[in-house]
Amino acid sequence: MAENIEIQEEDNEEEEGDDKIYGNAETTAQQKHPRKIRSVRRLYRLVGMGLGLLCGVQALLNIGLRLSLYSEWTEEKNNLVHHLDHVQSRYDILTEQKDQCGLNLDHLQSRYNKLIEHDDIKRTLCESHGFTFAGDVCYYIATVEVDWRTWEQSRQYCRDKQSDLIIINSKEKQDFVNTVVKRNQWIWLGLTDTDEEGVWKWVDGTPLTTPTYWLPGEPSNAGEEDCAVFHNGEWNDKSCFEPMCWICERVY
Ligand SMILES: [Ca+2]
Ligand SMILES: [Ca+2]
């Protein structure tokens, strides 16, 4: 027993000895290398400050970049708005000019209509286009027999002269044609039943009504005759493909 107590006392003495050794190690190191430790601490502080500075610079760069982009976008938006205003302004001006042209055109048409109410004006217009003015109607009398044409070709000739094949819807016009057409001449009229057999219509779309001047027994549609012709004061239906003379009528 006494021996054990002596051994424990020896161990305690040894542990107390170790604490003294390790507890004094740092103090000893500080005492031995004070400059080195201060340098390391200073280095840590400098590294920390550097990292903070870098973060700050990056934040400033981000803000600067965003401000730059916003500035460019704002300038582009302002340019677009300015351009849009300009286009709208031009559109308004053109719309106003269009409306003004419409008014001017209506005014001119009205004046033209009043002018051509006078027969002498009509006659002048008619004759200036190579037509003949008679009974308030303007005619182009194509009775040159060497230039016979089919019904469709004759009509196209009239259309090229801003007219159409003659419409005889009154006794006065029938009498006029009688006076200008020679005996035995065949003259195309603007009358056809091409759309529906037996239903005769003038080229302006109006149906055939009285008075009519068909030769007795006509229209016969003999061998498919769909176009009307004037011959010796009477009407007959003939094949539209036969060559004939024709008369154009121009309406003012
Ligand atoms: Ca027929
Ligand atoms: Ca016939």
Image (spheres, grey):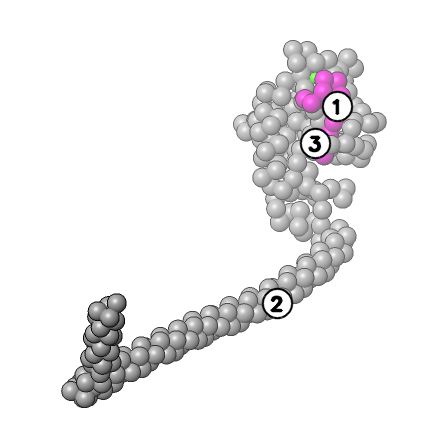
| Mark 1 / mark 2, whichever is N-terminal | 2
Whether 126 is drawn above or below 165: the answer is below
Q: Is mark 3 within 8 Å of ligand 1?
A: no
In this figure, which residue is indicated by the disc labeled 1? 200
Within-10-Å neighbours for mark 1: few <14, some 14–19, many 20+: many
Q: CA distance from mark 1 to mark 2?
A: 52 Å
User: What is the magenta segment's predominant secondary structure?
Assistant: loop
In this figure, which residue is indicated by the disc labeled 2? 93
Residue type at the position of mark 1: Trp
Q: Secondary structure at mark 1?
A: loop
Residue at image position (74%, 27%) is 201
Labelled pair 3, 1 in contact (Cβ < 8 Å): no
Asked if residue 63 lies left or right of residue 140, the reply is: left
Question: Which residues lie in the magenta part?
Answer: 193-204
Residue 47 x, y percent position in the rendering: 27, 79
Residue 200 x, y percent position in the rendering: 75, 23
Q: Quadrant of the N terminus?
A: bottom left
Q: CA distance from mark 2 to mark 3?
A: 43 Å
Q: Nearer the viewer, mark 1 or mark 2?
A: 2
Q: How many marks?
A: 3
In this figure, which residue is indicated by the disc labeled 3? 203
Residue 57 x, y percent position in the rendering: 34, 78
Q: Secondary structure at mark 3?
A: loop
Displayed quadrant of residue 131: top right
Residue type at the position of mark 2: Ile
